[in-house]
Image (cartoon, rainbow, N blue to C red):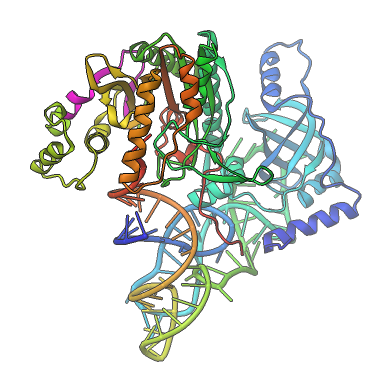
Amino acid sequence: MEFSDLEKIRYEKIQRLIAAGISPYPTRANPTHTIQEAIAAFTAGENDPNATPIQATLCGRLRSMRVMGKLIFAHIEDSQARIQLFLRINELGEEKLEQFREYFDLGDFVEAQGIVMRTRTGEISLQVHDFRMLAKAITPLPAAKDEILDGQVIRHATLADPEVRYRQRYADLAVNPDVREVFRTRARIVRALRDFLDSHGFLEVETPILQPIYGGAAARPFITHHNQLKQDLYLRISFELYLKRLLVGMLDRVYEIGRDFRNEGVSFKHNPEFTQLEFYWAYADYQKVMDFTEEMLRYTCIQVLGKPTFTYEGHEIDLSKPWRRLELRQGLIEAVGIDINEHPTSESLEAAMRAKGLNPKPGTPRGKLIDGLLGDFLEPTLIQPTFLYDYPRDISPLAKSKPTDPTTVERFEGFIGGMELCNAFTELNDPFDQEARFLEMGRAYEADDEERHPMDEDYLRAMRYGMPPNGGFGMGIDRLTMLFTDKRTIREVLLFPHLREREED
RNA sequence: GGGUGCGUAGCUCAAUGGUAGAGCAGUGGCCUUUUAAGCCAUUGGCUGGGAGUUCGAGCCUCCCCGCACUCACCA
């Protein structure tokens, strides 16, 4: 271990502690209360003259220290709360008080035993009768000092460099309680979604992450290898094809919450691995799923935030109302002034785009052009909750065509804050159509000189046993968390976002 | 992958091409109700790494590394 100057000083303190027979890393802590519990117990009995004083042993991290001769004020903090320690020579004696001054630093985990009281200025504090080191910190926390104003913790010069915050998330979390709150919110989101789906008869399942054939989404996969089987495997890019196999198997409402892996560019809304919710619902269609989505997100928002509204990038978003429902075609007419129905071929659409001053790459398939228009011009305008529905068939190989229009599929995507949040369709359950779509895909890809997308024969075999008509749904949990916590980048809602590897010096 | 910007003490930030600084943290003192406690003193830097221009580089040029923003890619 190499130490900085500051660390050397602390290391020497550890050596002196050991020499004095005090363990810097004792095996056990013995708290009687969390800090929050102790404060609550004290507050409850405070105005009762017959109440017995609250004796407590509290554990936490030392976050501030003010030494005033024969008196020390300090704060310790656990994951929920902080409390002031009030150490006097009266209770502790000279030697013990000196021990605190001598060996204890900001960032150390300590245990303090005493009586909960209020100081002269009214702050609830622990009058300390004894204390103990729980774990000595060698590296100082990357924060200078905290101020408490009207109960609000104001951090001065706290860790702010995003690179250090992401690479050393433990330090970020230790020092920035609002970051911890983001991940509590994230956990509540996942729990609320589970509650909702469970209570609507959905079964939570787990399907393979290592897959011999990937599929279900438009993405390049990560490839790995099984040594003994001498077989290449792919990390899944979606759960879709496995979950729909379960519908064949008579599990007619299933969902999975888990990790997807996509070997693509990294951006403020893309991480190579991300958390997805997908559900499949037999005998439902995309209209039912749309209604259900509204209800699910309203429920989740209320469970997580206590109200059906939230603010994202200055916009007040209201989930209590029905979402705007906009046909994709209509949305593009409004946003770009092009009616895609008037342009059934890629050549025609391309020409229309050029007439609007756009410069699409020649030879781009029609669906991809439409997807591009959507992403560039329509998506950023969809701030309030909006469902876009009815998508081109050729970018939706797993969705069922509209009975009235074979070139369009029953699909919708949900948008909030100018960001795609979810994607759903009436699922294709016709094995003949599905095989034809796979073949088209394969041809398109070879023509595009892209990676080959293998046909999933087993999926087709499953479908040949009969798959009930169903509605399917997928949603990025990370993006939902971004919305509910008002964060602009996905990295803020991932505990350990992927960063480029850096050589340690 | 392209473009733009950034990288200075543990943290947050200063510093016309001319001796690298402040606050907090740290260290040594004083201090029995403080709360960014206060007062006195004090340590701390290969200015991300390397090369160049210059009498002289934190600052100008080039290369490399990382991060941020952005564009492209992402059936």
Left or right of A187 in this view: A396: left
Residue A54 on the magenta span: no
Residue A161 visible in the current orientation = no
Residue A323 on the magenta span: yes
Note whether A108 is above or below A251 in the view shown.
Answer: below
Residue in the foreground of this view, choosing between A64 and A136: A136
Q: How many marks?
A: 0
Q: Residue A133: x and y, percent?
A: 80, 42
Note whether A370 is above or below B61 in the view shown.
Answer: above
Residue in the foreground of this view, choosing between A44 and A400: A400
Q: Residue A191: x and y, percent?
A: 55, 20
Q: Quadrant of the C terminus of chain A?
A: bottom right
Q: Which residues are magenta?
A: A314-332
Q: Residue A328: x and y, percent?
A: 23, 25
Left or right of A475 in this view: A204: right
Residue in the foreground of this view, choosing between A96 and A158: A158
Residue A395 visible in the current orientation = yes
Point out the residue furthest to the left here: A355
Left or right of A374 in this view: B63: right
Note whether A373 is above or below A286 in the view shown.
Answer: below
Q: Residue A117: x and y, percent?
A: 71, 25
Residue occupying image coordinates x 18% and y 37%: A346
Residue occupying image coordinates x 68% and y 64%: A5
Left or right of A413 in this view: A110: right
Q: Quadrant of the N terminus of chain A?
A: bottom right
